[in-house]
Each structure stands twice: as structure tokens, then as C-alpha cells.
Image (cartoon, helix red, strand yellow):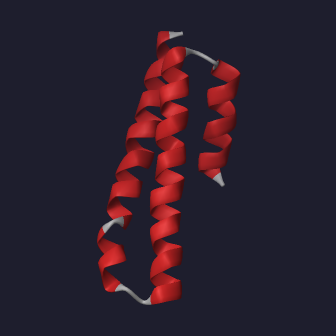
Amino acid sequence: MYHALALILCGVIATRGAATAGWLLQLGIVVFSGSLYALALTGVKGLGAITPLGGLAFLVGWGWLAWSAWRG
């Protein structure tokens, strides 16, 4: 839920850095949530190793968004 609000904030800020933050947050949503859904549906344990990469994309996206907002 909070990541969706961050995507809206990226659109409101609408700077070049905010666009990059938006892409990183979208990547985080796809990788994090997608790997968990795939793990739940298929039971393939190797997909659990991909999940932290989505979390990392979330962290970098939030940091990039904060940096973009601060820069103005």
C-alpha cells in the first residue's frame, strides 16, 4: 500500500530523479511480490532467493525518491 502511494508521489514530483525512483519501485513490486506469488503457487524454493532483490529495489527506490524530493 505504501509503495503505491510512493508511485503517486513520484508522479506529483515529476522530476527526472522521481521517474527513476518510480521505475525502481515498480521493479520492487514486480520482483518482490511476483517471486512470493510464484513461490506460493509453484512451491519452487529457489524463487525465495529472488525476493530480497525486490526488497532492495524498494529501499533504493524510496531513497532515490527522498533524494529527488529534497533536491527539489
Quadrant housing the N terminus: bottom right
Q: How far from the left and from the top, in percent, is residue 10?
A: 62, 29
30 up-or-down from 34: above or below: above
Counting from the top left corner in percent of width and height, residue 15 is at 57, 15
Q: How many marks?
A: 0
Q: Is residue 15 above or below residue 20?
A: above
Residue 72, image quadrant? top right
Q: Position of residue 65 (x, y in %)?
A: 50, 29
In the depicted structure, whether residue 49 falls above or below residue 59 = below
Q: Residue at x 53, y 75 (%)?
A: 37
The percent coordinates of residue 6 (x first, y second) are: 61, 39
Position of residue 7 relative to residue 66, above or below, is: below
Q: Residue at x 55, y 26 (%)?
A: 19
Left or right, residue 43 beside residue 50: right
Residue at the outermost bottom position: 43
Quarter of the figure with residue 63 = top left
Residue at point 45% right, 70% down? 35
Viewer-side residue, 46 vs 60: 46
44 left or right of 69 in image: left
Residue drawn at point x = 47 percent, y = 51 percent: 28
